[in-house]
Each structure stands twice: as C-alpha cells, then as structure tokens.
Image (tube, grey):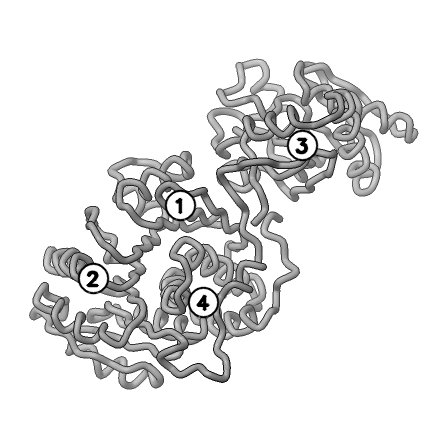
Amino acid sequence: MIPLLTADETRAAEARHDGSSDELMERAGAAVAQLVLDRFPGRVTVVCGRGNNGGDGRVAARVLREAKRDVTVVEELGELGDPDVVVDALLGIGFHDAPREDVARMIERINGCGAPIIAVDIPSGVNASTGEIPGAAIRATATVTFGAPKVGLAVGPGRFHAGAVHVADIGLAPGEHAASLVDASVLDSVPRKDHESTKYRAGAVLVVGGSPGLTGAPMLTALAAFRADAGYVAVAAPESTLPVFENRLLEAVKRPLPEDGAGRLLPRAVDAVLAAAERADAVALGPGLGRTDGTRDFVRLLLEQLELPVVVDADALWRLEPVRRSAPTVLTPHAGELAQLLGVRDVDAHRITSVEYAATRFGAVVLLKGADTLVAAPRRGLLVAGYGTPALATAGTGDVLTGVIAAFLAKGMDAQLAAAAGAIAHGLASRIAEPQAGLVASDLLPALRRVLAGEGRDLVPLR
C-alpha cells in the first residue's frame, strides 16, 4: 500500500518535519530541476505562482541556471517565450476552486505552447485532495511530487492530467492518510493451492446469471474464477440456456433454474440457487441476467437470504436498493451504473465522493471501475488500483473482473482487499496481454494465469 496524501495530510507531514520550510523548498526545487536536466533538453520557462509552489519553481529555475540552462521565469502571468520545456509552478496543493479568469488563460497558454510540461507537485487546476477539476487545468507530460503521491495524481480526472508521476524524497514522512494506492504486491496475499488443497478447499464459486443471447457473460465469469485459481465453479442459469453452457463450458458444473417464457429468471428460482450455493464459498451474481421486474425481485430476494459473500455486477445492479446482509457484499459498477444507483447525473467528475457515499448507502464494498479503479468500504480508507489500460474498454472485461473477485472471496480474503486484488490482477492482465489493439475479454484469461504466477509485478500503478 502506497500512501496517497490530501493537501491537509501533506501539510501535516510538513509540520512534523524537523527542518525548515526553506530546506524542503530547496530539495523540492532541486528535484524538479534534476528531472528537467535528465530528460528535457533546451530552453526552459518556469511559470511561478505566489505560494510555496511558486517558491519551488524559483528554486528549480536557479538550479537550472547554475547548470547553464537558458531559463525564463514568468511570475504568474506573462509571455512564455519560445521554450523547449515548461515548468508549471503556478498553483499548488492548496488550490481547490476554479482558477480565476486570467490564471485560466495562462493555463491554456501553457497547454497550447507545444512544449513538454513538467508540473510541480500537482498540475495547476487539479484538486490535490480529490482529483477533481473545476476549471482549466494543466495537462502535464510529467509531474514531480514530493514525499508521497497526492490523491489527485491517482484519481480521475486529475490522474489523466498528471503524465508520468515521479515521487521525490525530500525528507517528508507520510503519517495518517485516508487513501492508499495498491500495488502488485497485494497479490502475495491471495491464498494459493498447496499440497493439502482439494477443489473445495481451494475456493468454490457459484455464478448466477445468463439469459438467451447473454450466455457469454456468465461463461467469462466462470472461466475467470477458474483462472484466478478457484478449485470449483458452478453456473446456475435459466434451464433453457443450459445446452449452450454444456457445449462451451467444460470445467464448470451447471445448475438449471426456473425461468419465465422469455428465458429470464423468476423470483421462485431463489430456492434452487440457495440449494446450489450449499457447496459454494462465494457467489457472483448478475452477468447476463437480463433486466426485468422479475429478475430485479429475484436479485433482492436472493441477497436477503444468501449467507455467503457475493459479488453483485452487471444486470444485478439494475435498480438495486440497499439490502441488509450479514455476509460481505461487493458491488462492481462502472460510472454509468453507479450514477443510476445513486440517482445522479455525473459520477466521473466526483469519483471519490460518489464511491464513498455508495459504500455507506449500501453497507457494502463498492468498486468503481476505471483506469483509476476505486474500492471503498464503510468506515475504512479508500483503496486505488491504478493498473487499468484503455484495452479494457471492451465488452466482457467486467465479467472477467467479477469472476476474479469471486474467486478471491471464495478463498477467504477480506472483501475490500479481495476487490482491490482482483482489480490489480485484472489490470495487470490487460497490460501483459498482447497485442493491446483488438484485445477481447477472453484474452485476459490466459494472462491472468501469468499474472498470478508473478509476471508483470515490476509494472508501476501510476504511468
């Protein structure tokens, strides 16, 4: 777990520092200058604001001049000249509102200059504590941050303005923090099969879903659970769809469920699912389920009666209301599904607020999908899993994630940690699967085996 600091948590770390603030500023500015010297040749323009961020920029400018670089310093507003690289020291971590109009114009001027941009601590215009962007914001090529990454560098939309993130050690020790960036080492905590394992002791998963035309989703979930090292997987699906599963899904046990005339599950299917769940350690609910009033009632009744950990995904999230449960529940919505669950129009602009509110409202672990996948749990810190790639923006990848999380839950992992570890394994699989262009969900399945065997552990969560 890598600490992610808010502005207040960063100030607290600075207050605990034994040395002077000038000492910290010297180290910060020198770190920025060193990155420029190492990677960005040519003329440098440093744009400095009025606060400590501007002070860091002025130190960087001095160090660059001492290294014989051609440096122009712009104090907040002014002409950039003709730089080969721009250092953005305009707005610091204390910023949280939209920039005033003249500063916003300066930000757009920097963005439009055509030169690489190096942000000092946080790209100007990005809220360091949330990643929210209320107005104009720098789109950096790289960001040099100090002591520990800021929340706004790991969470969208700020994450997508940060470029490559470089953490400089300037002598700050992070203290208490509410958010953490999860790296690949979390996969070391996933229980593995040993010589005493049986197929049931290695984790048994029941996948509940499927309907005519939507059988692929639960099949992907079942296969992903196997590839995530579950020992036993069963699929409970509408009886009329079972021939498809029998022909395409060799390793899983199949359980027929009562259905309506259109092949959708009915509330009376709950008893059959509960019977099938007697051998399961966790349930994956929703892939390919379809959306009718009947399936919605089925989901509610099943959640009320099932005393196993459940991953609720896809169609099972449709019009879902909070259900009191004694066993762990993991909801895995994308932004559109979470917006529907919360009755709001936009989630991506306020990702942290949205996912934390959802966790409280539903009394569940909530995983908000994205390149910056967020995992919130009631009264616990936020976990950020930042390994996703654009290749995951294709149908079926969410079904794979559901199967991985279900397998980890079946192995007895804590629900929030299982969700985060599942997102890490899923994201790493998307990174090592080749080629990236044209990747389909089933391409993740063999890559999952490689990830759990240790491949890709050297990849970093922030690009």
> Label 3: which residue?
119
User: Which-is-in-front pick, marks 1 and 4?
Assistant: 1
Q: 33 or 420, which lies in front?
A: 420
Q: Position of residue 397 (x, y in %)?
A: 41, 62
**Tag 4: residue type?**
Val
Q: Earlier in the sequence, mark 4 or mark 2?
A: 2
Q: Residues within 10 Å of mark 1 (few under 14, many from 20)?
A: many
The residue shown at (35%, 73%) is 222
> Label 1: which residue?
376
Q: Are marks 1 and 4 in contact (CB under 8 Å)?
A: no
Q: Earlier in the sequence, mark 1 or mark 2?
A: 2
Real-space Cα separation, disc 1 to disc 3, in angstroms:
29 Å
Q: Residues within 10 Å of mark 3 (few under 14, many from 20)?
A: many
For residue 396, say whether it is visible. no
Q: 392 or 207, which lies in front?
A: 207
> Label 4: which residue?
440
Q: Position of residue 363 (x, y in %)?
A: 28, 46
For residue 356, the mark is none
The residue shown at (24%, 81%) is 254
Dot 4: element: loop
Q: 199 or 33, which lies in front?
A: 199
Q: Earlier in the sequence, mark 1 or mark 3?
A: 3
Q: Position of residue 263 (x, y in %)?
A: 14, 70
The residue shown at (48%, 69%) is 191
For residue 290, the mark is 2
Dot 2: element: loop
